[in-house]
């Protein structure tokens, strides 16, 4: 076919190639190859989209065909929609590890969406029995989360791990370009995953143990080293979330995503990546809501208040801390206690700048008393000296800071004396 005939828009180009292919008695996969070859460089046409254009189908028709096969297999409708199909066709999201891959393959009567597979094909070159056998293998692979994945997860996960392991010796305070790309991927792919199986108790325990280690390491490890490990954990949880699982298991996985997301956001804040930090706090908040764990929801809000405290406004801090306390309804948890302490600290800072406004002074004093009362109700595990707890040293720091803003000299000195065993001398003088 003359290439000059197909220099106009994608749909017209694909339609002409489809008509020519049908007249030449080509199979639809062969026509899709021709569409891909002619349209990919000029229009960005993917192989998956080429298969739909080869048949002249609308997205609705494809989704209806997928849904018909999915209902026959599972007795329930598929959750694939037009937006998801568009993401697959435009390459914004990979179809390779999707639950719906076998059904798309069946709809288009192919065994793979890799280009160059059907160029030498004739309509009778492949037996139906062979095709059915291959489809059965692919379907079984998706059900069992194996098949071409090896021991390190899917190809996408393996690529991400390879990149992060390559940064094992990363140092400095500038986020490398390769890690920045993975941060974008991590945000976007987890965001898509939330809208989408059982896990062994051993694997869930390993996951929880790994998160506990990160909470300890977060105090000591350099930011980029920490970020590399956290992203490895993040992608592992996302991989587990891509499979449909019992409700309790799904909630546990969302709960596991929360501390990882918070620690990523906190690390990014330390690196000066404020926009990325905010986005990961948003994802941690979404995971907390889906986990239906009130304490986790409050924890995200309280931790997130650190960002506007240092790089935003007092109004933003108070909005987050107030919401954390409202959600926890006064029950003692790290989120409510930390949120209350941050609220007292901010109100005291405002009061120090407006000494003649009596109501602000009273509000700050009331919040300070409430913060101390809540902290006294925390148990030992909630006061553990690790990230995402509220350790004694952090409480003393906030308590002393609030006392200083309120002009309570005796309370400030007492907090400093108590904190002497927790902080280096230079930190106590700031």
Image (tube, rainbow, N blue to C red):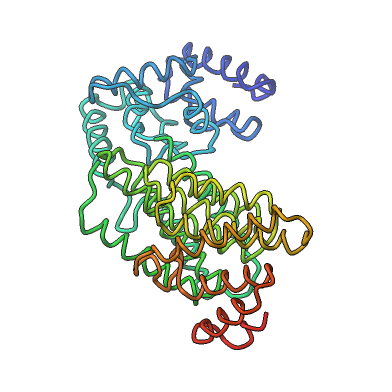
| Residue drawn at (56%, 15%) of the image | 15
On screen, residue 208 above or below 318: below
| Residue drawn at (60%, 18%) of the image | 11
**As rendered, which of 25 and 325 lies closer to the eye?**
325
Whether residue 219 sits left or right of residue 379 in the image: it is: right
| Residue drawn at (50%, 50%) of the image | 186
Quadrant in the picture for residue 43 = top right
Question: Which percent across, then down, holds residue 145?
Answer: 28, 45
Whether residue 77 sits left or right of residue 334 in the image: it is: left
| Residue drawn at (34%, 69%) of the image | 380
Question: Which percent across, then down, holds residue 202?
Answer: 21, 59
**As rendered, which of 426 and 77 lies closer to the eye?**
426
Question: Which percent across, then down, holds residue 360?
Answer: 69, 54
On screen, residue 416 above or below 1: below
**As rendered, which of 399 and 104 lies closer to the eye?**
399
Question: Which percent across, then down, holds residue 297?
Answer: 45, 48
On screen, residue 208 above or below 430: above
Quadrant in the picture for residue 248 = top left
Q: How many marks?
A: 0
Q: Quadrant of the N terminus?
A: top right
Q: Quadrant of the C terminus?
A: bottom right
Whether residue 240 sits left or right of residue 16 in the image: it is: left
**As rendered, which of 368 and 391 lies closer to the eye?**
368
């Amino acid at each position: 076919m003359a290439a000059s005939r197909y220099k106009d828009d994608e749909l017209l180009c694909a339609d002409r190639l489809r008509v020519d292919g049908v007249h030449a008695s080509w199979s639809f996969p062969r026509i899709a190859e021709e569409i891909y070859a002619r349209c990919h460089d000029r229009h960005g046409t993917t192989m998956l989209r080429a298969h739909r254009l080869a048949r002249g189908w609308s997205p609705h028709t494809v989704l209806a065909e997928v849904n018909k096969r999915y209902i026959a297999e599972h007795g329930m409708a598929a959750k694939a929609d037009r937006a998801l199909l568009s993401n697959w066709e435009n390459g914004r999201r990979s179809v390779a590890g999707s639950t719906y891959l076998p059904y798309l393959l069946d709809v288009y009567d192919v065994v793979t969406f890799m280009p160059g597979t059907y160029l030498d094909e004739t309509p009778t070159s492949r037996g139906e029995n062979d095709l059915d056998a291959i489809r059965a293998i692919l379907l079984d692979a998706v059900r069992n989360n194996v098949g071409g994945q090896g021991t390190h997860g899917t190809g996408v996960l393996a690529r991400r791990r390879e990149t992060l392991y390559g940064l094992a010796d990363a140092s400095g305070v500038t986020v490398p370009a390769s890690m920045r790309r993975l941060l974008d991927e991590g945000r976007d792919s987890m965001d898509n995953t939330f809208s989408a199986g059982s896990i062994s108790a051993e694997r869930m325990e390993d996951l929880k143990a790994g998160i506990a280690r990160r909470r300890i390491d977060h105090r000591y490890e350099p930011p980029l080293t920490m970020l590399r490990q956290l992203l490895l954990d993040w992608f592992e949880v996302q991989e587990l979330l891509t499979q449909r699982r019992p409700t309790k298991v799904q909630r546990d996985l969302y709960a596991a995503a929360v501390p990882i997301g918070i620690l990523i956001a906190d690390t990014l804040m330390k690196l000066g990546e404020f926009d990325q930090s905010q986005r990961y706090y948003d994802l941690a908040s979404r995971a907390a809501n889906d986990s239906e764990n009130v304490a986790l929801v409050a924890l995200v809000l309280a931790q997130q208040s650190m960002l506007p405290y240092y790089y935003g406004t007092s109004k933003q801090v108070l909005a987050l801390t107030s919401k954390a306390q409202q959600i926890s309804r006064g029950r003692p948890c790290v989120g409510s206690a930390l949120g209350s302490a941050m609220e007292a600290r901010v109100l005291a800072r405002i009061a120090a700048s407006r000494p003649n406004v009596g109501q602000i002074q009273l509000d700050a004093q009331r919040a300070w008393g409430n913060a101390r009362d809540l902290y006294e109700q925390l148990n030992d595990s909630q006061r553990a000296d690790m990230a995402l707890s509220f350790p004694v040293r952090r409480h003393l720091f906030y308590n002393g800071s609030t006392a200083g803003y309120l002009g309570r000299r005796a309370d400030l000195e007492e907090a400093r004396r108590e904190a002497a065993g927790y902080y280096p001398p230079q930190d106590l003088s700031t």
